[in-house]
Image (cartoon, rainbow, N blue to C red):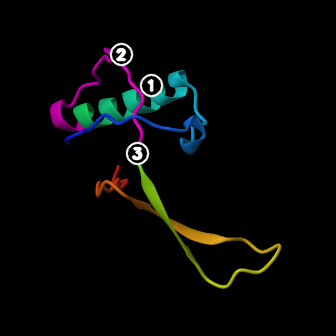
Amino acid sequence: MKTEEIEIEKEEMIQKTEFSDENIFDAAKRAAQRMVRRQIGKIAYCTLDSMRSIYRPYYVAFYGKYEMGARIRYLPIEADGNRVQKSL
């Protein structure tokens, strides 16, 4: 996947993650072990090589009738065209 570095004018334009780096690493480690175990039949040992934050743009499509006090319905749409689908 091609990435591009850009300058962000206002820091408040970016929504920070709600998860700690440790939680993110643990989830990635479990996913990697699951994929490797399916291919080789063994549990692999994973270590963190490097970690960097990226900004991933999204569009938000609101739908339905807006009513005060009711739940707002929306769909997040990946602006970079990459879809993430859970199949594990």
Residue extending furthest toward the front? 9
Classified by dominant secondary structure, the portion drawn in magenta counts as: loop
- What amino acid type should be assigned to the residue bearing mark 3? Arg
- C-alpha gap between disc 2 and disc 1: 8 Å
- C-alpha gap between disc 2 and disc 3: 22 Å
Residue extending furthest toward the bottom? 65
Few, some or many residues within 10 Å of mark 3 (<14, 14–19, 20+):
few
- Magenta stretch containing residue 42, yes or no? yes
Say above or below: 71 vs 50: below
Q: Which residues are magenta?
A: 38-55
Q: Nearer the viewer, residue 40 or 82?
A: 82
Residue 20: x %, y % from top left = 57, 26
**Rendered residue at 45%/61% (across/down):** 59
**Number of the label disc, if any, that sits on residue 25:** 1
Q: Is residue 67 left or right of residue 7?
A: right
Q: Which residue is mark 3?
A: 56
Q: Is residue 15 left or right of residue 5?
A: right
In which quarter of the view is residue 5 placed?
top left
Residue 66: x %, y % from top left = 71, 80
Q: Earlier in the sequence, mark 2 or mark 3?
A: 2
Residue 44: x %, y % from top left = 27, 21
- Magenta stretch containing residue 10, yes or no? no
- C-alpha gap between disc 3 and disc 1: 18 Å
Q: Earlier in the sequence, mark 3 or mark 1?
A: 1
Q: Nearer the viewer, residue 17 or 37?
A: 17
Q: Which residue is mark 2?
A: 48
- What amino acid type should be assigned to the residue bearing mark 2? Leu
Q: Can you see residue 3?
A: yes
Say above or below: 59 vs 17: below
In which quarter of the view is residue 3 placed?
top left
Are discs 2 and 1 less than 8 Å apart at CB? yes
Q: Nearer the viewer, residue 80 or 25?
A: 80
